[in-house]
């Protein structure tokens, strides 16, 4: 048996920017829970290590209990790619015990069992706090395995509906009613609905689970007249606003407030879209606020594939439906319009008429009329106020991480501001 399961980070994190500026890829949400939680569930009782970049590590260590960060001890380990969308039977497909080997899907390393000298070598790489380099698994026997990883943000969206259903089944959530449901609420397909303790379903709300499960987390609220069409997941303490329309394939993390029309979106956590406006096929990080009547396009008028700016290059998504990808702590003013495939970095503030550019680097302030750099000290002061409203502290670890992101994105900002 391996001494530990290590959820490792590789260079693939860069294709998930700006979402991964402030977290390892394994902490991204897909379904009801995040990628790392699916992996951990497959190996209960085994020590868990999360590997990530050094500037992100202190935040991960502070926020996750019973997890070691960037430190591997012992003489053996099972390493699992943090971008893996782990199935419920992952431990059967990739056992923690067995001979050293690498499991790969084409050229992508999915997992590896290591021991002895190889384990010691990898432990040093993990302690360095950098993504594992190419060639780290050279010399190990190889096995092909058909398991998917997340390569781009739109992969999270395209897999989300199926992952809500998979998580719902794995966690055995069906038909459990622990909250308060008003007598006038409509629950269609009740055996596929989970309402956790402390949750409230207000008068006239409609939960339609005929086409997929609906999960309502502890202390969450579905307000009067809101309509949810499964598969949908609503995290702990989140609120679905009055008359909201939440369509299939939408996951809303903890402490969010979401209203208007939402289709196939993921809200990581602690983000707000309280008012009317359409948002589709988009991923929103944490501490985001979308002003009233913010809308995005998720389909081009010519029905062609959407191209997206990813880490300095244009990538054909291969899909007609791609909305927006928005990094942590970004804001959009009232009536903001976002084009198909728009990418907004960390700490941005968008406002003004017309569409802003499809790529907005981190810490930019402005819109279609132009941008100025968001001053770091003012940004941090705002972030501190925003987090305090949810009884969260902007810790020294958060400040250091966001300051590092500010430094890492100077070049991108300079290109827009010149």
Image: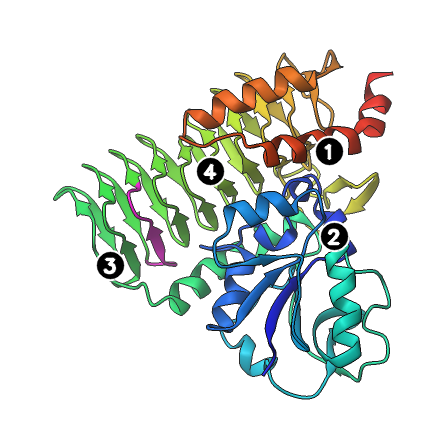
Marks 3 and 1 in Cβ contact (< 8 Å): no
Measuring from the top left, give residue 333's x and y in whole percent.
55, 17
For mark 4, give the secondary structure. Answer: strand
Q: Are marks 3 and 4 in contact (CB under 8 Å)?
A: no
Q: Is residue 41 visible?
A: yes
Colour mode of the rendering:
rainbow
Q: Residues within 10 Å of mark 4 (few under 14, many from 20)?
A: many
Please tell me whether residue 418 is drawn above or below residue 259 in the rendered image.
above
Q: Dividing the picture into quarters, in which one does residue 189 lie?
A: bottom left
How busy is the neighbourhood of tag 1: few (under 14 within 10 Å), some, or many (20 plus)? some
Q: Callout 2 environment at 10 Å: few (<14), some (14 to 19), or many (20+)?
A: some
**In the depicted view, which residue is nearer to us: 149 or 236?**
236
Q: CA distance from mark 4 to mark 1?
A: 33 Å
Q: Give the label on residue 262, or none.
A: 4
Residue located beneath label 3 in the image: 190
Q: Which comes before the other along the chain, label 2 or label 1?
A: 2
> Secondary structure under badge 2?
loop
First to last magenta residue range: 210-220
The quadrant in which residue 144 appears is bottom right
Mark pair 3, 2: CA separation: 46 Å
Q: Say which label, 3 or 1, has the lower sequence index.
A: 3
What is the CA distance from the residue labelled 3 to the residue labelled 4?
A: 22 Å
The numbered dot on residue 129 is 2
Q: Is residue 311 left or right of residue 2?
A: right
Label 3 crowd bin: few (<14), some (14–19), many (20+), radius 10 Å:
some
Question: Is label 4 or label 1 in front?
Answer: 1
Mark closest to the chain's N terminus, 4 or 2? 2
Q: Position of residue 304 (x, y in %)?
A: 72, 44
- As displayed, is residue 373 above or below residue 299? above
Query: Is 155 placed above or below 47 here?
Result: above
């Amino acid at each position: 048996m391996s001494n530990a399961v290590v959820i490792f980070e590789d260079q693939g994190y860069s294709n998930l920017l700006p979402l991964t500026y402030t977290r390892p890829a394994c902490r991204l949400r897909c379904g009801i829970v995040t990628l790392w939680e699916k992996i951990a569930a497959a190996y209960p009782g085994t020590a868990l290590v999360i590997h990530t970049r050094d500037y992100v590590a202190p935040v991960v260590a502070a926020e996750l209990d019973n997890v070691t960060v960037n430190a591997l001890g012992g003489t053996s380990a099972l390493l699992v790619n943090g971008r893996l969308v782990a199935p419920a039977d992952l431990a059967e497909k990739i056992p923690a015990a067995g001979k050293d080997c690498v499991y790969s899907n084409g050229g992508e390393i999915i997992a590896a069992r290591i021991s002895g000298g190889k384990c010691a070598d990898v432990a040093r790489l993990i302690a360095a706090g950098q993504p594992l380099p190419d060639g780290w698994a050279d010399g190990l026997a190889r096995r092909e395995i058909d398991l998917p990883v997340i390569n781009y943000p739109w992969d999270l969206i395209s897999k989300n509906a199926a992952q809500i259903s998979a998580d719902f089944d794995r966690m055995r959530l069906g038909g459990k009613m622990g909250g308060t449901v008003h007598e006038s609420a409509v629950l269609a397909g009740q055996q596929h609905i989970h309402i956790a303790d402390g949750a409230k379903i207000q008068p006239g709300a409609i939960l339609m689970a005929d086409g997929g499960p609906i999960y309502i987390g502890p202390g969450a609220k579905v307000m009067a007249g809101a309509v949810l069409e499964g598969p949908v997941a609503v995290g702990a303490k989140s609120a679905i606003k009055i008359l909201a329309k939440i369509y299939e394939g939408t996951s809303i993390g903890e402490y969010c407030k979401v209203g208007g029309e939402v289709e196939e979106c993921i809200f990581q956590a602690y983000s707000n879209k309280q008012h009317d406006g359409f948002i589709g096929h988009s991923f929103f990080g944490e501490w985001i606020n979308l002003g009233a009547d913010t809308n995005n396009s998720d389909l081009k008028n010519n029905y062609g594939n959407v191209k997206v700016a990813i880490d300095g290059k244009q990538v054909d998504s291969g899909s007609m439906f791609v909305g927006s990808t928005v990094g942590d702590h970004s804001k959009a003013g009232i009536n903001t319009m976002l084009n198909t495939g728009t990418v907004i970095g960390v700490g941005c503030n968008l406002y003004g008429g017309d569409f802003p550019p499809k790529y907005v680097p981190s810490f930019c302030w402005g819109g279609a009329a132009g941008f100025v750099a968001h001053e770091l000290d003012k940004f941090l002061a705002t972030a501190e106020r925003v987090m305090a409203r949810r009884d969260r502290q902007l810790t020294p670890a958060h400040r250091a991480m966001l300051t590092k992101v500010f430094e890492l994105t100077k070049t991108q900002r300079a290109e827009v501001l010149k």
